[in-house]
Amino acid sequence: MSLEDLFGEILLDHAKHPRHYGRIEDAEISVEGANPLCGDEIELFAKTRDGVIEAIGFTGRACSICTASTSIFCESARGGRFTDLDGMKERFYKMLHGDTVTGEEEHQLGDALALKGVAKLPARVKCATLVYETWSVMKRRLLGESAAPVRASSEKISRV
């Protein structure tokens, strides 16, 4: 089995069997994100304590890339600190924009590395990054900062 085959299997598995799918009924916060270009819509739910994500989940209607990316994000986020996710977001964006990612950074990306091929499909990058943009809004609200809803445009993720 080639590495590309393995990555394909990881993505399909997350897309068909998304982890952490569903509302968290006692969530302290939820934030919606949308990509009108392709119709992806997700809503993230979270419970946190002292900067640590105790529970995270999502619902929505999204393409397989967005669903897999959100599932992988939630797997990585649960039990992590906000600052850990900032680093993960930075590495993920670096990978999707074709910048050099070190072996250590690839290791830190974990299953998110399976989305590496999305870099070759610029129109789909927004599908993969919608969860990170939605998380950024959620984090700012958790920290008491205001943040506009997330909406992806044809040019870039922008606030409306």
Image (cartoon, rainbow, N blue to C red):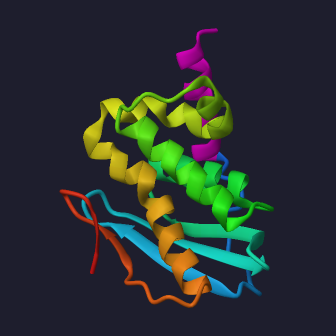
Determine the image quadrant of residue 142: bottom right
Determine the image quadrant of residue 37. Answer: bottom left
Q: Residue at x 73, y 64 (%)?
A: 81
Measuring from the top left, give residue 126's x and y in whole percent: 35, 53
Q: Quadrant of the N terminus?
A: top right
| Extent of the magenta region | 1-16
Residue 70, compared with residue 55, is above or below; it is: above
Residue at 77%, 70% in the rendered image: 52
- In this figure, what is the number of numbered marks? 0
- Verify whether residue 87 appears in magenta: no
Residue 8: x and y in percent read 55, 27
Q: What residue is drawn where x is 54% and y is 85%?
A: 141
Q: On the rendered image, what quadrant is the C terminus found in?
A: bottom left
In this picture, is 87 found above or below 44? above
Q: Residue furthest left?
A: 155
Percent position (x, y) of residue 39?
Answer: 33, 62
Provide the major secondary structure of the magenta segment. helix
**Magenta stretch holds residue 6:** yes
x 62%, y 39%: residue: 109
From the viewer's perspective, tell me whether residue 121 is left or right of residue 60: left
Q: In front here: 82 or 2?
A: 82
Q: Is residue 12 visible?
A: no
- Residue 54: % across, % down: 81, 71
Above or below residue 75? Residue 124 is above
Q: Give whichever of 117, 143 is nearer the camera.
A: 143
Q: Is residue 7 above or below residue 21?
A: above
Residue situated in front as seen by the camera: 127 or 53 = 53
Query: Is 141 situated left or right of 41 in this image?
Result: right
- Residue 114: name its quadrant: top right
Residue 62 appears in the figure: yes
